[in-house]
Image (cartoon, rainbow, N blue to C red):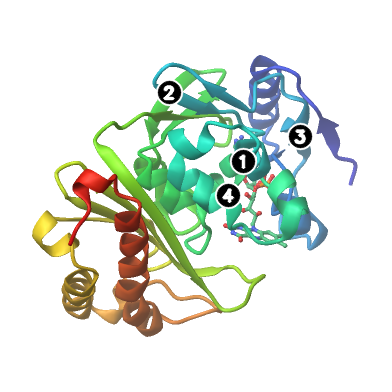
Amino acid sequence: MNRRIIRPRTVAEATNTLAEVTAKGGRALVVGGGTIAVPQLTRREVDPSDIIDLGDLDIPLVRYDEDTVRLGPAASYQSLLDTPSAERRVPLLHMMAKGITGGIQIRTQGTIVGSLVCARPCSDAPAVLVAHAAQVTLSSVRGTRTMPAERFITGPERSDLCPDELVTELTFRSRPEATAHGYYKLKFAESSWPVVTCACCVLADGTVELTLGGVRGVPWKIRLPDGVANSPRRLRDGLEDHMSALPEDDFWEDIRADGAYRRRVAATVASRASRQAHARLPSAMERP
Ligand SMILES: Cc1cc2nc3c(=O)[nH]c(=O)nc-3n(C[C@H](O)[C@H](O)[C@H](O)COP(=O)(O)OP(=O)(O)OC[C@H]3O[C@@H](n4cnc5c(N)ncnc54)[C@H](O)[C@@H]3O)c2cc1C
């Protein structure tokens, strides 16, 4: 089959092509870094009529305004790590990007948007984007819409993306109330995919926001009051009680681990992320 490969320079060019392909009843495959899409093509799991490669899009990879960080569709993990203020402005994203396996090749090639669109429960990025309250901007010839990452992910490997739409931006507003962050992931080997992840954010009033990945089909946000959150042991015990009250089929399972295992380890992963975050608290807020 002869497939067209298009390398748009502008969003208008990309969305016009998507609209044209969709109107003709075709199916376009949008490619960011291609670390997931290209293997799917080679394995013939997808059979698009057209391929739209976003690699040449004329959109900055990472931009910093006064109180906002913006990631373009081609922003890779490495492009974020290469910007000096990322660690301060989007700390969880920075910690997550450092821990992506596959070496410099995957960190440079894989995009953060690509991981979000795939919405795989076991990927690092979706839960971290939810933890950072990222806003997702979608563009098509019909216009532009923006929604929280939490709403964009509608289920395991499902998102609210229409066939004629592109994700054109991820936006992060600074959160002055968030004082310390931690990120912990459980994986079975140095190079393996995550099994369970937890992004932790300690707020100025001591409240802890935990966002767990790989535990349920979508990122799972839990807020704990100061009294529970300031002791890793109480936090773990509290979460364990909470998890054991939920039915096993509420938990995600895949080739790496079943739901029972994920339920068993989630509280420990969360307490490690929380411990990391509390260790980074400014000294005036440090716990005894
Ligand atoms: C060796 C190896 C190690 C890895 N390690 C990890 C790891 O440690 N943690 C982890 O989470 N992941 C890991 N991954 C997975 C991969 O790196 C990420 O998921 C990556 O971020 C995917 O981005 P991409 O740009 O390559 O996506 P692509 O393959 O380009 O696209 C993925 C999907 O998103 C769609 N898409 C992409 N961009 C857009 C857009 N702008 N608008 C609309 N749709 C779009 C595509 O159509 C496709 O369906 C690993 C992969 C490999 C091969």
- The quarter of the picture where residue 62 lies is top right
> For the residues marked 2 and 3, what is the alpha-carbon distance in whole angstroms?
27 Å
Say what amino acid the circle numbered 2 marks. Thr
Q: Which label lies toward us, 3 or 1? A: 1
Residue in front for this viewpoint, 23 or 127: 127
Question: Callout 3 environment at 10 Å: few (<14), some (14 to 19), or many (20+)?
Answer: many
Residues tagged 1 and 2 counted as in contact (Cβ below 8 A): no
Badge 3 element? strand
Pointers 1 and 4 in contact (C-beta within 8 Å): yes
- Judging by the rendered image, the residue that carries numbered circle 1 is 81
Distance of mark 1 from mark 2, alpha carbons? 17 Å
CA distance for labels 4 and 3: 23 Å
Residue designated by label 2: 68
Query: Which element is circle 1 on?
Result: helix
In percent of the image, x 9 and y 60: which residue is there? 227
Name the residue tied to disc 4.
Answer: 97
Q: Position of residue 183 (x, y in %)?
A: 43, 57
Label 3 vs 1, first from the N-terminus: 3
Residue 220 visible in the picture = no
Beta carbon at label 4 within 8 Å of ligand 1: no
Mark 2 vs 3, N-terminal side: 3
Mark 3 beta carbon near ligand 1 (under 8 Å): no
